[in-house]
Amino acid sequence: MTGTYRAIQLQRFADTFRAGAAIVDLERRQPRPGELLVQNLYAGVNGIFDTQIARNAVDYVKIALPTLTGVEALGTVEAVGDGVTDFAAGDAVVTTRFPGGYRQWNIAPEGHFAHVPDISPEWLALASTGVSAAMALEHIGAVRDGETVAISAAAGGLGHLLVQLALTRGCHVVAVCGGAKKVDFVRSLGAHRVIDYRSESVGDVLAADYKDKLDVAIDTVSGTIFDAFLDNIAPHGRVVVGGAAADLEGRPEIVTQPRIAHKLYYKGASVRGFMNGLLAEHWPPARERVFALYAAGKLKITFDEQRFLGLEGVFDAVERLISGQSMGKVIVDLRTQQA
Ligand SMILES: NC(=O)c1ccc[n+]([C@@H]2O[C@H](COP(=O)([O-])OP(=O)(O)OC[C@H]3O[C@@H](n4cnc5c(N)ncnc54)[C@H](OP(=O)(O)O)[C@@H]3O)[C@@H](O)[C@H]2O)c1
């Protein structure tokens, strides 16, 4: 199959994804030996990562311009290259490899794809964000059944799955999010204590009710939430750093306070970085676990109420996510163009 397809290309580094990226036409070619040609039907949106890519601020991705963009997508196999035996035309597949996402067609080595049962977008969220959540909580956070787990941005794509995964382990979940609507949502997931950082001080609530009780604290926001998690970490507790949304401007806040070494040493606690892109060898078993939990009805995917269509919709979806207003996983339906 030949012809052209559309994809979002980052053409220059810029302050916003929209300012640096444009939709381009590319040649569609036949898959080479070992490759798949896949039609993307849905793409997952990682607006904070996308914005940092646009700003050339993701340390572990060496960006040579121009580059295609987007990470995860769900689609169907159109054709397979010589030597491919595990996939066939018509299979539903998912990829979670940059830059597999914001494009109508993907041509990549078969190792970039995994089978999913069908083309329901839930599998996209599970294979990408669900696996990230499992990696952060289990692999890096080393959670044990029944522990106390704190989670920031708990109403978000990653956060709402972290909350549910922790609950499946019988954990006591302390969730942090911004705004009454999000609080209701996170409560409905079963979190035991939900802190609305817009109306309560996370530090005060934790100091009063969870002093030195957080066994695992997964933070993707930074700022005072990170400080509050660290201050209240339990003996042998693990603070997992999975992002720094509050530092999206690329100017991390400079703070002056005692070195965190002192807060960690006497408790035997640790601060651990979580970077899912560095954990690819661990994804397949994590994927199996989250798929099984979903099939058993123990994990539910919530998608943001706002719908985004076509590649044009990606720009709006990125902005929706970084506005802080989305709840659940943000995805784009690539099957239809925006009107
Ligand atoms: N390390 C990794 O490998 C990895 C993998 C996946 C995701 N992540 C990170 O995990 C976080 C969640 O990802 P997601 O895609 O699921 O996003 P998301 O949680 O659906 O959306 C981001 C949320 O972050 C919170 N936030 C706090 N300060 C913010 C700010 N200044 N600007 C924008 N948002 C702010 C907002 O919720 P509240 O206002 O309720 O706090 C917002 O809704 C992101 O920071 C992402 O980069 C990291």
Image: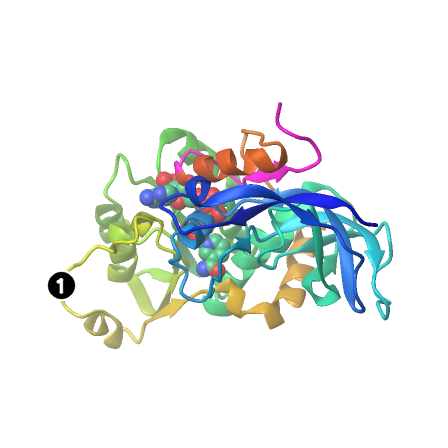
Q: Is residue 191 visible?
A: no
Q: Describe residue 311's horizontal placement relative to residue 118 as left or right.
A: left
Q: Nearer the viewer, residue 244 or 249?
A: 249
Coloring applied to the structure? rainbow
Q: Residues within 10 Å of mark 1 (few under 14, many from 20)?
A: few
Query: Which is the main secondary structure of the residues drawn in magenta?
Result: loop
| Residue 10 placement (x, y as % from top left) | 50, 50
Q: Describe residue 60's horizontal placement relative to residue 129 as left or right.
A: left
**Residue 336 falls in which quadrant of the image?**
top right
| Residue 307 placement (x, y as % from top left) | 58, 30
Q: Nearer the viewer, residue 83 or 327?
A: 83
Residue type at mark 1 is: Gln
Q: Is residue 179 visible?
A: yes
Q: What is the number of callouts on the image?
A: 1
SS at badge 1: loop
Mark 1, residue position: 257
Q: Nearer the viewer, residue 237 or 114?
A: 114
| Residue 109 placement (x, y as % from top left) | 72, 65
Compared with 144, 123 (above or below) is above
**Residue 15 falls in which quadrant of the image?**
top left
| Residue 281 placement (x, y as % from top left) | 61, 72
Compared with 128, 329 (above or below) is above
Look at the image and give the residue range highlighted in magenta. Answer: 323-339
Compared with 58, 6 (above or below) is above
Q: Residue at x 62, y 57 (%)?
A: 96
Compared with 143, 210 (above or below) is above
Q: Describe residue 266's horizontal placement relative to residue 114 as left or right.
A: left
Q: Nearer the viewer, residue 96 or 223?
A: 96
72 part of magenta stretch = no
